[in-house]
Image: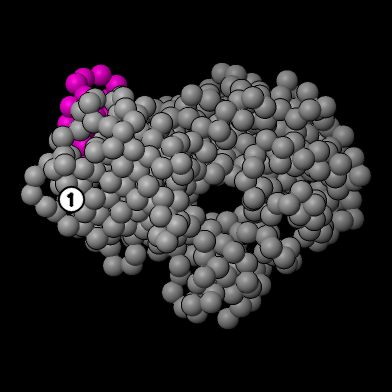
Amino acid sequence: MSITRNDGFFHLNPAVPLDADPGSEGVATWLRNALRCPLPPGRGGVTLRVDPSKPIEGYALTCAPASLEITGGSAAGVFRGAQTLRQLLPPAALRRAGAVDWNVPAVTITDQPRFAWRGVMLDVARHFMPVADVLRFLDLAAFHKLNVLHLHLTDDQGWRVEIPGWPRLTSVGAWRPSSMLGARVHARDDGRPHGGFYTTDDLREIVAYAASLHMTVVPEVDMPGHMQAAVAAYPELGNGFRGGVRTTWGISSHVLNLGDEAMAFCRAVLDHVCDVFPSELIGIGGDECPPDEWEGLGLSGAQPWFTAQMAEHLASRGRRLYGWDEILTGGAPPGAVVAAWRGPRPTTVAARLGHDVVSCPDIAVYLDYRQSDDPGEPTPVGTLLTLEDVYRFQPVPPGLTPEEAAHVLGGQANVWTEHMENARRVDYMTYPRLCALAEAVWDPPGRSYESFMTRLPEHLSRLDALGVNYRPLTGPRPWDARPDAPGNPQTLPGRLAQLAEMTANLPKTD
């Protein structure tokens, strides 16, 4: 980012006109609503322009006492510049009440993102989030210039998307009789039913709202593992399991069978998902699929075949498969995009094999991991992952050639919700660490954590104005703790040893 500060202010008030070229009209409508300011059409005030010679998401914001102009390489670039404008305004401008009369400092900013994929994954399978909470999650992510929401829609503990012709997926698979309280080693149960699902109209609303924020929603329907909720609804999809939706965390051994009916089911699911989500990438998970049931039936090494079948079907719809890094074992299909989560090594392996890859190693960007060793942290699990740890995340691992590094599309943080039962908990675990992630995937190398920490307190006042229940820099408050839901923290050396064992079967690329 290049910043030049000048003397004076631009006075923004309801009388200021806004002039937008045809490519920026959508951003103009959004900006009027976001600022609660009419900004009537006309010249001589705020100007929004698309200049295709600029990077697609790059922008220039020029503010002088008599005018304010945002020029972007596309409508998305103009939108990123408009978010910067919101961050130049006082926090009161982010509230829904109060006077619409603000001074914008005279400044010239030229900026563009380092990575094309700047994402966050939200797990709505473990704990369902109503549509309004998802839209708010999108708003906050867009405010930080993220551009991808990876939406994890199904898992062993819940199926959250209706599929035509398969009504029991939501009447049965979307509900569980209880949930675990805390880490599974404690075997505590809350005894409360939990569930919910999104109708097709709900999902179209989420997609449309994201598009208005220049964000892409990448859906994920996990298969062939993490399918217990689907098998509970339709036992014929499984391998003899006759039970309910999983009520405990962890990995279920009850996976999809690979017969004709089950394969037809998977294709029907992906067809509907393709009809609802315009994203080029469609997630099938492909992670943590225990082969026990298959091996009991004399099947072995079947998962790469399954993944290839789904990739072929998605290709027939003009889409590409997106899967967790387990799909590399046995050979990922050509064109598949990998979400590399099991430490830093899978990013390197995928890139060297020529696969596009999104870097999201758990030890760097899993926001369900504990934020400090303070005993007041709610349900402390995973390795210690501080604000500084997230800020220092490097999506491109060392040792890659420039050609290999070009396959790293970017990075994302992952918000797994086993221990986040509502939006308030999601806020606490996500912010301000997602603020740090946003800079890690936007700024070029050499960014300064010290500079970030100098700027963060002012930014937290913006989050206050937006009503975000972020974790205070001073640590957890008494009411943030969850003594009824104890955790199970890990040490980093212990986790690294686990990851080395988990990834030992990845292809050798050294």
Q: Residue at x 78, y 23 (%)?
A: 167
Q: Position of residue 385 (x, y in %)?
A: 37, 51
- Position of 9 with respect to 136 (left or right) is left
Q: Position of residue 72 (x, y in %)?
A: 38, 52
Residue farthest to the left?
A: 7
Q: Residue at x 54, y 74 (%)?
A: 404
Q: Which residues are magenta?
A: 87-102
Quarter of the picture containing the C terminus is bottom right
- Position of 38 with respect to 453 (left or right) is right
Residue kind at label 1, given as amino acid type = Val
In the image, 362 versus 504, the foreground residue is 362
Q: Quadrant of residue 346?
A: bottom right
Whether residue 211 is in magenta: the answer is no
Q: Quadrant of residue 471?
A: top left
**Residue named by callout 1:** 107
Which secondary structure lies at badge 1?
strand
Q: Position of residue 57 (x, y in %)?
A: 42, 54
Q: Residue at x 81, y 43 (%)?
A: 267
Q: Residue at x 23, y 31 (%)?
A: 16
Quarter of the picture containing the N terminus is bottom left
Q: Is residue 243 visible?
A: no
- Position of 275 with respect to 298 (left or right) is left
When the figure is inspected, residue 3 is found, relative to residue 216, above or below; the finding is below
